[in-house]
Image (tube, rainbow, N blue to C red):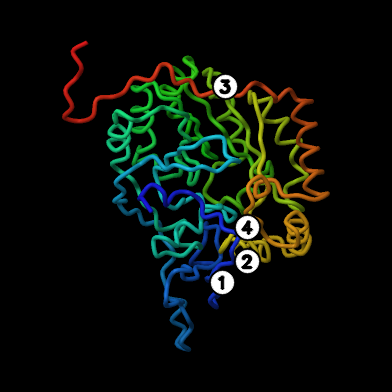
Amino acid sequence: MGDADIDIPFDDDAEPQPPQPHKVVLADRRRGRGARSNASGRFERDAVEATDDGWESLGTLEAFKTEVREDATRTIIARNDSPDISFDRSINPYRGCEHGCVYCYARPTHCYLGHSAGLDFETILYAKSNAAELLRAELSAPRYQPQMIALGANTDPYQPIERERRITRGILEVLAEAKHPVGIVTKSALVTRDIDILAPMAAEGLAKVAISVTSLDRHVARAMEPRAATPSRRLDAIRQLTAAGIPVTVMVAPVIPGLTDHEIEGILENARDAGARDAGYVMLRLPLEIKDLFREWLAEEFPDRTKRVIGLLQSMHGGKDYVAEFGLRQRGSGPYAEQIATRFKLARKRLGLESERLKARTDLFVRPASRGQQLALF
């Protein structure tokens, strides 16, 4: 498996190894985080867990702090051949995500690095500092053929550390220079910082942005996505991007049955009013470790809804928490899934959120010169 391939979400219908016993981490140690526990990754032979030894030592343990490590990846464009995804290549500037969304389907990928899908995922981050240089080299390869690159298909390219690292911005600068199409997926208002790059690209049909809005309820959003932008800031980001001529899609993702599904119409209407031109949705997905992490979170934040949420979710996956089958993994099946799909379709049509989606324009592509390469004379 190549370095870039590790960014592709681990969608396997097979059950993970039997979960190792673990406890919910003390609240003071995980304040402002999404996951409640930090069980060892499924590939680890030994389970490591903080345990009270009778001397009240747990009270002296430090809180989880964000640690950023350098990623030693040698390639930057990840490829996929999934038939239910609209792109075949993506770039993820970071591994792990400080936003801490408890439902994030990328959490299990952290286990490949020897970490937990729980608190490790949102506190031990990897930055691909040489991403722009690697991208330039890959785009300059003689055999490279341009197609839409999805930026942030796994972890958010505009998570908090991007303010200092500016890796995402460096990637956009290379793509703009090469006139290469890009689609961005984020739940951060920081994307507006790069309007100066995205607006000229959008004017040539080379850029679009998808903003994820899970809930309009500030308290629900804070509980689910503790370090992501508030709903109002995401709507404001849609306004700013739209005003700059950048096409914006609102993603109601994920839709959590029994918790946020009643907000579908409200989210779409508010996003339309802010300037969004298109809309999409994805149902909650609970592969591998996420099923336990989500249950822990739900039991603490919404104990009165736990049974209903899990019951509705399983009704859309044949009694299971998750089915990885293409075409079903993002939508589910059965009466409740069909009801969600119908509501979304009707609201989308009523609100006029059915604009023609931006196609990847590749005719403007200019192969960049790699470092040390002599420029062509003609």
Residue located farthest toward the front when viewing the structure as drawn: 143
Q: Assess whether mark 1 and mark 2 are in contact (beta carbons under 8 angstroms).
A: yes
At label 1, the amino acid type is Val
Q: Which of the marked residues, 2 or 3, is nearer the chain's N terminus?
A: 3
Image side of residue 296 versus residue 228, left or right: right
Residue found at x 78% / y 31%? 347
Identify the element where label 3 is drawn: helix
> Nearer the viewer's eye, disc 4 or disc 2?
4
> Nearer the viewer's eye, disc 3 or disc 4?
4
Q: CA distance from mark 3 to mark 4?
A: 33 Å
Q: CA distance from mark 2 to mark 3?
A: 38 Å
In the figure, residue 11 lies in which quadrant?
bottom right
- Give the label on residue 24, or none: 1
In the figure, residue 277 lies in which quadrant?
top right
Q: Which of the marked residues, 1 or 4, is nearer the chain's N terminus?
A: 1
In the figure, residue 64 lies in which quadrant?
bottom left
Task: Provide the residue designation for mark 4.
Answer: 286
Residue located farthest toward the bottom when viewing the structure as drawn: 54
At label 4, the amino acid type is Leu
Task: Provide the residue designation for mark 3.
Answer: 242
* Closest to the observer, 216 or 72: 72
Q: CA distance from mark 4 to mark 2?
A: 13 Å
Task: Provide the residue designation for mark 2.
Answer: 296
Q: CA distance from mark 2 to mark 1?
A: 8 Å
Identify the element where label 4 is drawn: loop
Residue found at x 29% / y 51%? 72
Q: Which of the marked residues, 3 or 4, is nearer the chain's N terminus?
A: 3
Q: Which of the marked residues, 4 or 2, is nearer the chain's N terminus?
A: 4
Image side of residue 47 versus residue 83, left or right: left
Quadrant containing the C terminus is top left
* Closest to the observer, 135 or 362: 362
